[in-house]
Image: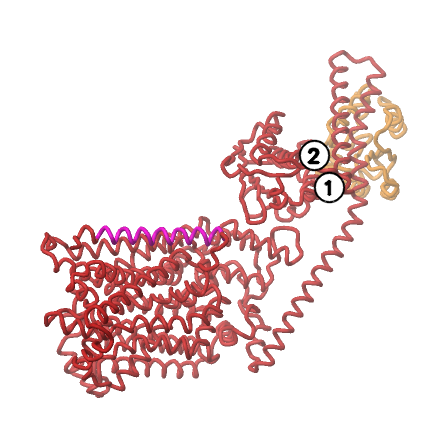
Chain colours: A orange, B red
Amino acid sequence: MGKQVLVIEDEPNIIEAISFILNRDGWSVATHANGETAAEAVLGQVPDVLILDVMLPGRSGFDILQELRGHEATQALPVLMLTARGQKKDRELADRLGVSRFMTKPFSNAEMLEAVRDLAGSPTS
Amino acid sequence: MVGFNALVLVCVAYVAILFGVAFGADKRAREGLPGTAWLRGPWVYTLSLSIYCTAWTFYGAVGYAARSGLEFVTIYLGPTLVLVGWWWVLRKLVRIGRAQRITSIADLISSRYGKSNLLGVIVTLLAVVGTTPYIALQLQSVTLSFSVFAADRQEGFELLDLNATALWIAAGLALFTILFGTRNLDANERHHGVVTAIAVEAVVKLLALLAVGIFVVWGVAGGPTEIARTIDASPISDWQMNGGRWASLTFLSAAAFLTLPRMFQVLVVENVDERQLATASWAFPLYLFLMSLFVVPIAVVGLDILPKGSNPDLFVLTVPLHFDQDGLAMLSFLGGFSSATSMVIVAAIALSTMVSNHIVMPIWLSLRSDGASMSGDVRYLLLISRRLSIGGVLLLGYLYYRYSGGGAALAAIGLISFSGVAQVLPALVGGIFWRGASRNGAAAGLIAGFAIWAYCLFLPSFGPEGVISDQIMAHGPWGLEWLRPQALFGIEGMDPLVHALFWSMVVNTSLFFIFSLVSFPNPLERLQGAQFVNVFEHSGATRGWTRGRAQAEDLMIMAQRIMGGGEAQALFEAEALAQGKESYLPDTTPGFIERLERELAGSVGGATAHAMVGQIVGGASVSVEDLMAVADETQQMLEYSSQLEVQSEELSRTARQLGEANKKLTQLSIQKDAFLSQISHELRTPMTSIRAFSEILRDGGMDEAAARKYSSIIHDEALRLTRLLDDLLDLSVLEAGHVTLHPQPDNLSDVLDRAVAATTSVGEGAGIEIRRNPVHEDIDIFTDTDRLAQVFINLIANAAKYCDADTPRLKIFVTKRAERLHVDFIDNGSGIPPESQAVIFEKFSRLSDQAKAGGAGLGLAICREIMDKLGGKVAYLPGQGGAAFRVTLPKAPLAAG
């Protein structure tokens, strides 16, 4: 069983793509599509890496990140943020909130995979 | 010789002609056909006043002259004095009637004294009690005139059942009145048909009386000189004038002219333009003069020629018959018939409005705990209640005729009726000229006057077998001599009519003044008082509501049920437009609520409208400013304050517009940012999937099924991108105004057909049932119908996507207005919450999650731009149950086709 990545994202096709890429590399993937209950889901079972979308139904990714950084269990959790809004101020805000990595959509699969490996090592070690 | 059947046939034909006239006039007035201005002109108005001359005047004046000499002139003198000398009183009444949308005399009194329904009920009861015998009198006169023809002939006329005749006449009149009197609910929409028919009847009765008169003077007596000699020789010339009675009767007829419910109906409610009073003020006295010109000659010749004991009330008929002038007798019969029917019709309309507005509606309102905000169409209920009231009034008249025994008891009824309704006079005149007049004063005066009139005049008219026995008449109740009905307080030897009139008016007026002076009027009363008394100074600027917790949508729902959907929506839309708002719902400013209340008052009366609005608005009905305005007693202060009011209203309107503009600018800048990041998001999301899966496919190594699946995801997302780009381009072209329209003649129904076909064929639209009315849709239009169809498709697709009912249904219906065309799309789902209604037309606004929506949220924004370019608009229509959109098309470009 590989290390766990939790993907919080609401677009079904993107979820499918990320899951495929990570599974192929040996990661174990869980997904969650609702912004409102996302923080609870993370705290319930803290993954090795969190991939977090910004525009989610119910609650924004920034809000979720801010909350997670306030909890001891997730204070240092590696978080890779993905956004389709390519604005500079979004990146700045994410940095301020303590994001580990910030990528804009569309991303290259290889880059995304590399970022996850950077944050959590190899999937099985 | 005229047979009975021929007589009935002539009657039926005459009524059919009146039906035609009323129907034609109604139709023409409603469609506003050119050349119909005279229908609302001063002549029809003047002639309609002739319902003052009932059968009692037509037949009875001659009888009156034969019995009491020139005294009959007083009946004509009163109205003449009012019109010639007091027409400014009438002008004020008419102005108040229009400003306050008064529906009846009961409504006037009720509205004036703080919209008190108690007063409305009192006046209504007074009017019903006073008018019922009068209606009976008309029925009697028509049946009597039938029997005159019967008596003159032997051929089986004895079979003629007078009661049945009266019943048939009453039923026929009820039918006519219901047909033409309750077509429009709003009394201010007026009954053009009825009024025109009455004007025709006015001409018929005048011609009839003049014809009989000319026949009598030149045909029988042999010229004016001869008739003068006959008059000198007759007992009429011995008649001595009784000063007290003369003055009382003149006063009485003048008062009745103002206060009779039917006169108020034609004088005030049916008045279209107060300038018509100027014509009526000389033309109607002239009419009365012509009506009275030949009364004495006919009476004298009748007394001279006919056998002793002939009923002088029927001389107008019997004199021509005596000389075998069948045609003339028939004309005269129709004159009397006209007099009777026109009075009954208008009286029934006036009384039914009162009964329905002041008795039925309030009872019904109080029976419903949720009051005005219940479900169901109040209009329907109102119409039913008016129709039943008309039937009820005529039934009462018939029963009175049937059981009063007719004959002698009825002869004096005209004047008794007059004295009854005259009791309203102090409250009426005091109410429009004296701001100190209060509700308590009006109620005390009315009740006392009503009671004295009933005790001294009305009840004794039933004779000793009726309510008041001989014992009481001679010695008073319980032997109290000073309470004798015809000698109150020991004043004896007075004429009974003068006696009753004197006491009732003295006590009525005194109590009215005393109670007004000692009681303190409530704020609404003072406010209404100021508006009635100073109607010429500040008409229109009426205020009554402070900003309560009024919910515009609730008010609209209520207004729709009373005024009908179209009218209510037009009113709200116009107000919203005046406030500079784009939606259909205006702010509930005090001014608007007041205006709405007045509109409703036109349908259900002032007191009821006030109660209904109060149930929704909830707030106090009079503001501090209003109280201050009332407290300013001097004219200048009032004028100044109304100027200030106008200014401050203007200021607050400007402020509101500025505020809206400012809000819009701020929103625009926020929206621009939001728009950019929205576009970025909408473009990048499908691109992310496309890139990710194309890289996965490039890497290879998956089975064929997975590969096919991933390719089709790429395909779908590419389509999504294309759609988005199409929408964006469409929108930017529309917004930049570079769009070229291709107007073409088409039929609205066909455009809708195409739109429905386009939506239901793609599958997702198939789940919704669409209801349409092809008859209403059959309208030729001239516009860019491809663009129009695009709007329709969007609205239908939205309904199919978002309607959350178990069995989703979409109603599409088309209404034609004067200047535009409405196409409404109303589904049966749960609708759009008020806070979201404002944003749905913005770009990228999707209320539900995007996976379900499938579009980028640009559809309604595009629709709005398209309709703007087509010169129409599309807006959310609140208060319809489900989600509802209204597409408005201007009519002007349609005509170009």
Query: The disc labelled 2 sits on which kind of residue?
Result: Gln
Q: Is residue B517 left or right of residue A50?
A: left
Tell me the residue that label 1 is attached to.
B843
Number of numbered labels in the structure image: 2
Q: Is residue B358 left or right of residue B863?
A: left
**Image coordinates for residue B221, horizontal then vertical, percent:** 19, 72
Of circles 1 and 2, which is in front?
A: 1
Looking at the image, is B274 positioned above or below residue B161?
below
**Image coordinates for residue B113, horizontal then vertical, percent:** 44, 72
Query: Which residue appears at 58% of the width and 44% of the height?
Result: B821
* Mark-to-mark CA distance, 1 and 2: 14 Å
Q: Earlier in the sequence, mark 1 or mark 2?
A: 1
Query: The disc labelled 1 sits on which kind of residue?
Result: Lys
Tell me the residue that label 2 is attached to.
B850
Q: Quadrant of residue B18?
A: bottom left
Q: Is residue B106 visible?
A: no
**Image coordinates for residue B437, horizontal then vertical, percent:** 44, 79
Nearest to the observer: residue B357 or residue B85: B85
Quadrant, the C terminus of chain B: top right
Q: What stretch of residues is rendered in magenta?
A: B8-32
Which residue is the extreme one toward the top? B704
**Image coordinates for residue B787, horizontal then vertical, percent:** 67, 36
Is B18 part of what is drawn in magenta? yes
Looking at the image, is B721 positioned above or below residue A72?
above
Label 1, secondary structure: give it: loop
Nearest to the observer: residue B348 or residue B70: B70
Nearest to the observer: residue B19 or residue A24: B19
Q: Chain of mark 1?
A: B
Looking at the image, is B468 positioned above or below residue B726?
below
Q: Is residue A81 visible?
A: yes
Nearest to the observer: residue A103 or residue B381: B381
Q: Chain of mark 2?
A: B
